[in-house]
Amino acid sequence: MGEGVLTAGFVLQGTIAKEFVVRGIGPTLGTFDVSDSGSATELLVFRASDETTPFASNNGWFSSSGDGRELGACSLIEGSGDSVMRASFGSDPYTAQVLPGSDTIDPGSALIEIYDASVADLRSRLTNLSARTNLTANSEVTVGFVLDGQTPRGVLIRAVGPGLAEFGVTGTLLDPQLLLLTGSTPEVGNNDWNGSEISRAAAEQVGAFALTFDSKDAALVTTLPPGAYTARVTAPTNQSGIVLVEVYLLPDD
């Protein structure tokens, strides 16, 4: 957190509003042996149409709001200093940010989680998840996601560093490396996307911004059965910088 504020984006598409539970986890990470977890978090969610005024926020979780455990999320300790918010979201892009709980709290590792409270109702569903952060050399950022349903689905996954420069972002990670895992088992990876026609066509299909053909951004397209997955992006030993990790659900054929 702090200078390298963890930012997650998500897009809901469909015909109805849906309730989501969004969590900014800091202190509870310590129970999973994360040594540098933040001691308290503040969670802010913005609409893409208004990046100044939060759509919803929370600073300090209490049982009155619930912690999302009924959706499969890990239980939080009452008054733990983690952040939880429940809200009804319309079809729109959103951005969630996790910051230290106050100006006097040191930065630390944090986790943003987004849960669909009505996953069986497919009139609206998440079609894109992303995370943006500042990686130091040899460090990593992960985006976990779950594909529900009965049939395999196509996904586009990208790790964008150099491609952020065209949006005025400085200090980007020059050569992000991407790996998709099931549990701890590697499935497929990519280092440089090399202008892949398959990745380019998938990006056009979902409305993702274009990458320069010879850039060292990473991208892959694959078909996955229902289950839980992790997209891991690592920084090379001699690099640090800002990177954006994106996961897009491709439309049904």
Image (spheres, rainbow, N blue to C red):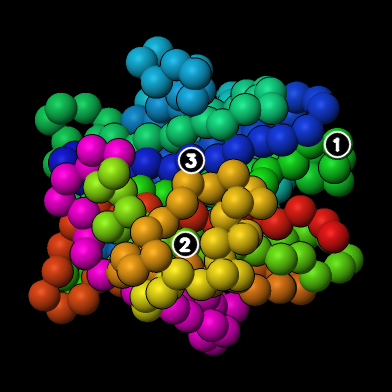
According to the picture, the residue beneath numbered tag 2 turns out to be 158
Taking the spot 21% from the left edge, 76% from the top edge, the residue there is: 236
Task: Say which quadrant the N terminus sits in.
Answer: top left
Residue 169 painted magenta: yes
Residue flagged by tag 3: what amino acid is it? Gly
Quarter residue 136 falls in: bottom left
Do the residues under discs 3 and 2 have CB atoms within 8 angstroms? no
Residue visible at 59% across and 44% down in the picture: 207
Residue marked by disc 3: 9
**Label 1, on which residue?**
123
Secondary-structure class at tag 3: strand
Q: Is residue 168 left or right of residue 239?
A: right
Query: What kind of element bears circle 2?
Result: strand
- How many numbered marks, from 0 up? 3
Which one is in front, 105 or 53? Answer: 53
Q: Which residues are magenta?
A: 167-190
Whole-Å distance between the Cαs marked 1 and 3?
A: 20 Å
